[in-house]
Amino acid sequence: MLTPENQPLLPKTGRLAGIDFGTARIGVAVSDPSQKWCSPLETRQCTAWTTEIPLAAADAKYFRELATSEQLVGWVVGLPLHASGDASEKSQQAVSFGNALSQATDLPVNWMDERFTTAAAREILNAGNLSGKKRKAALDKIAAQVILQTFVESDRSRHHRDRDHRLE
């Protein structure tokens, strides 16, 4: 089982997908093959998330098809930590989801600290001229874009070396 402490290094080229995990909705973003630009893709309504089944069959099928159609080489799943950096119940759920996602698609997964990404996504959306309903609909996929962009711009070797959070 992968955890944020033992995650593999993702390839430095090839398309990645960023995931803003939620038990009701999952925001999805993708990078270009050079991993310089990230774009929001969509928000996926989850079929049925439970602790025992972190990735329902219909959702697994969706992510397998996405991996094929987008020619993905890996996943970056947002890790919701407390402001202190400590793990939360949502962190455990995101790790379970990431492991199920990796198993379903046969692609590696990394987790990225997602503290404040929703606030950053709201800021981006508020700068646009969108109605409240359109902003709400776009929030999860913009948060996924922020998670993925932060990851591709990070020093990955440092990201893997200096893990300052522990999941227990």
Image: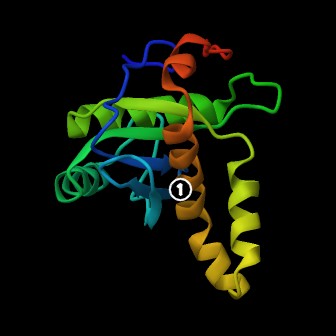
105, above or below 162, in the image: below
Residue 161 x %, y %: 55, 11
Location of mark 1 (residue): 145
Q: Residues within 10 Å of mark 1 (few under 14, many from 20)?
A: many
The N terminus lies in quadrant: top left
> Residue lying farthest right?
84
58, above or below 85, in the image: below
Q: Amino acid at mark 1?
A: Gln
Residue at horizontal 52%, vertical 36%? 94
Q: Quadrant of residue 76?
A: top left
Residue at horizontal 54%, vertical 40%? 153
Res 55 seen here: yes
Relative horizontal placement of residue 10, taking residue 23 as reference (left or right): left
Residue 7 x %, y %: 42, 19
Res 21 seen here: no
Relative horizontal placement of residue 19, taking residue 90 as reference (left or right): left
The C terminus lies in quadrant: top right
Residue 50 x %, y %: 46, 42
Relative horizontal placement of residue 112, taking residue 98 as reference (left or right): right
Foreground residue among 87 and 126: 126
Foreground residue among 101 and 49: 101
Element type where label 1 sits in the image:
helix
Residue at horizontal 28%, vertical 52%? 63
Foreground residue among 137 and 17: 17
Q: Quadrant of residue 74?
A: top left
69, above or below 20, in the image: below
Residue at horizontal 76%, vertical 56%? 119
